[in-house]
Amino acid sequence: MLALTLCILSSGCDSRSAPAYNNRGIAYSEQGEFEKAIAAALAIAEFLEADPRVSRVLYPGLPSFEGHQLAKQQMHGGFGAMLSFELAGDFEKANRVTASTKLFQLAVSLGAVESLIEQPASMSHASYDRDDRLAHGIKDELIRLSVGLEDPTDLIADLDQALNG
């Protein structure tokens, strides 16, 4: 179950899997681009983990992540470019955050070279019964990011301004 949760919430993979992402619509064209996205995802995860406006960060690259040791064993080239986090807030707050980013595009996708943001409770999992969603760890305040190739400092600043809203 932990490995399944790792996959669903963080979508982590190692850089050797990057060609598989190309088959799903992600276009990392140059050597090292996927690694840049992975590094940016880690920087964002670290920022969010230190932020009191965030109650939980789900990223296998963080030592605080429940499955971090398993991820280290399985993800030899990095921890992926996707992460999830839960706000210290509610459904409406998460909805406002996702709607107010400037660089992250609001979309339900694994992403591409541009960074994406979504609130699963109002988007990808909106048709699920709320109690079923909650039973599977998909809370109203959960936000999922797919990190692209933008500068991580700019992405962090974008999230910061959105969290202030």
Image (cartoon, helix red, strand yellow):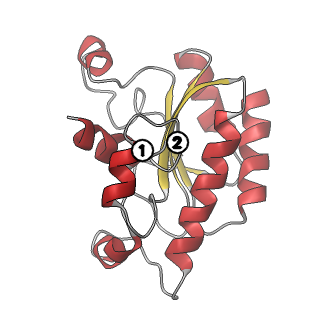
Give the residue number, with chain letter if any, for mark 2: 63
Q: How packed is label 2: few (under 14 Cα within 10 Å), some, or many (20 or more)?
A: few
Q: Is residue 115 left or right of residue 27?
A: right
Residue 91 horizontal/vertical position (percent): 52, 18
Q: Is residue 38 visible?
A: yes
Residue that lies at the very extreme toward the top in this rendered image: 131
Relative to 13, residue 1 above or below: above
Q: Is residue 148 visible?
A: no
Q: Earlier in the sequence, mark 1 or mark 2?
A: 2
Q: Is residue 18 left or right of residue 63?
A: left
Relative to 24, residue 101 above or below: above
Q: How packed is label 1: few (under 14 Cα within 10 Å), some, or many (20 or more)?
A: some
Q: Is residue 163 left or right of residue 133?
A: right
Residue that lies at the very extreme toward the left in this rendered image: 1
The answer to which of 58 and 29 lies nearer the viewer is 58
Q: Residue at x 36, y 61 (%)?
A: 75
Relative to 5, residue 139 above or below: above
Relative to 97, residue 153 above or below: below
Q: Residue at x 25, y 43 (%)?
A: 3
Q: Secondary structure at mark 1?
A: helix
Tell me the number on the disc at residue 68. 1
The answer to which of 72 and 163 lies nearer the viewer is 72
Residue 132 horizontal/vertical position (percent): 23, 17
Q: Secondary structure at mark 2?
A: loop
The count of marks equals 2
Residue 84 horizontal/vertical position (percent): 48, 39
Asked if marks 1 and 2 touch (Cβ < 8 Å), the reply is: yes
